[in-house]
């Protein structure tokens, strides 16, 4: 009789050990169901509760409200709670015109979007095509027909010589700082094909000006002073060379004056 009792206890222990993994598995399934069910309910509620009825944009001048809405791609009646500002920012920043963006959720139904747009800084003439570029050199938009606002022109291919293009933008910045562009009709910064920054030049109302690398504000200051003297003396100029330190070389049509 004692032996049978021991066997029954041993059998009960074995049965308990077999049931424990089953209980653990059921507990895991239950917890997983609660977790994923909760997430599903939260997603449904967050994407339907406080539906967006109005999107208010500010700061946009080039891009229209409808264009911005299309870029954002919000679904109809999307809930304010479930909207991801990070995802919307990533979509809007894909547009070259959008420099920065911020959002504010104005419950219960409005989304406020503040846009900082890039501004056309210069025109880039490349391979027979013309583009707006910003102060960082980003291509904003190709110009196709219509009137073009007066901006300094950079001619050349920035993709083949990014360093020279960067220097051309620095020259444009110096010209704007000096008010030089406002004094002229057409200013074109030339990036010679296959050349370096030391060969940058300008066409200023038809006159060739060899600029070279760096010290752009000082060079432009010398050029402005020289132009007054050339105008007074009525010298027909072939080109002006600003590449030498503390002096300017003027090449008249017939001879060189130093």
Image: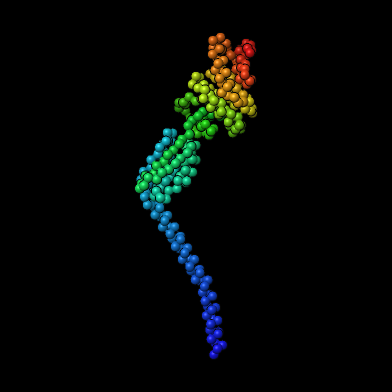
Measured as percent of width and height from the top left, residue 171 is found at 56, 26
With 34 as the anchor, is 197 left or right in this view? Answer: right
Outermost residue, top side: 233
Q: Quadrant of residue 63?
A: top left
- Picture coordinates of residue 168 (x, y %)? 57, 28
Q: Residue at x 61, y 31 (%)?
A: 163
Which of the 4 image quarters holds residue 225? top right
> In which quadrant of the rendered image does the C terminus lie?
top right
User: In this view of the protein, can residue 206 be seen by the observer?
Assistant: no
Front-lying residue, 244 or 187: 244
The answer to whether residue 58 of the structure is visible from this angle is yes
What is the number of callouts on the image?
0
Give above or below for 79 relative to 146.
below
Q: What quarter of the picture does the N terminus occupy? A: bottom right
Residue sitting at 49 percent across and 71 percent down?
23
Image coloring type: rainbow
* Position in image of residue 101 (x %, y %): 45, 40
Viewer-nearest residue: 92 or 174: 174
From the top left corner, tell me how far across and down residue 69 is, in percent.
Answer: 42, 41
- At 52% across and 76% down in the image, what residue appears? 16
Residue reaching furthest to the bottom: 1
**Which residue shows up at 56% across the image and 28% down it?**
170
């Amino acid at each position: 009789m004692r032996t049978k009792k021991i066997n029954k206890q041993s059998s009960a222990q074995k049965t308990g050990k077999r049931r424990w993994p089953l209980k653990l598995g059921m507990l895991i399934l239950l917890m997983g169901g609660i977790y994923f069910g909760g997430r599903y309910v939260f997603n449904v509620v967050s994407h339907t509760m406080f539906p967006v009825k109005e999107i208010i944009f500010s700061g946009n001048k080039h891009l229209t409200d409808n264009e911005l809405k299309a870029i954002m791609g919000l679904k109809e009646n999307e809930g304010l709670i479930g909207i991801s500002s990070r995802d919307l920012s990533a979509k809007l920043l894909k547009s070259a015109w959008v420099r920065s963006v911020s959002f504010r959720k104005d419950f219960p139904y409005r989304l406020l979007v503040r846009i900082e747009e890039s501004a056309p800084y210069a025109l880039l003439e490349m391979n027979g095509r013309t583009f707006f570029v910003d102060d960082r050199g980003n291509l904003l938009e190709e110009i196709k027909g219509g009137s073009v606002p007066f901006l300094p022109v950079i001619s050349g291919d920035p993709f083949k010589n990014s360093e020279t293009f960067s220097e051309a933008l620095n020259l444009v910045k110096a010209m704007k700082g000096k008010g030089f562009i406002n004094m002229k009709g057409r200013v074109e910064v030339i990036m010679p094909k296959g050349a370096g920054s030391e060969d940058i030049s300008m066409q200023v109302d038809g006159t060739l000006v060899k600029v070279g690398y760096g010290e752009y504000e000082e060079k432009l200051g010398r050029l402005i002073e020289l132009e007054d003297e050339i105008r007074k003396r009525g010298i027909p100029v072939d080109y002006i060379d600003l590449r030498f330190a503390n002096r300017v070389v003027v090449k008249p049509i017939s001879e060189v004056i130093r």
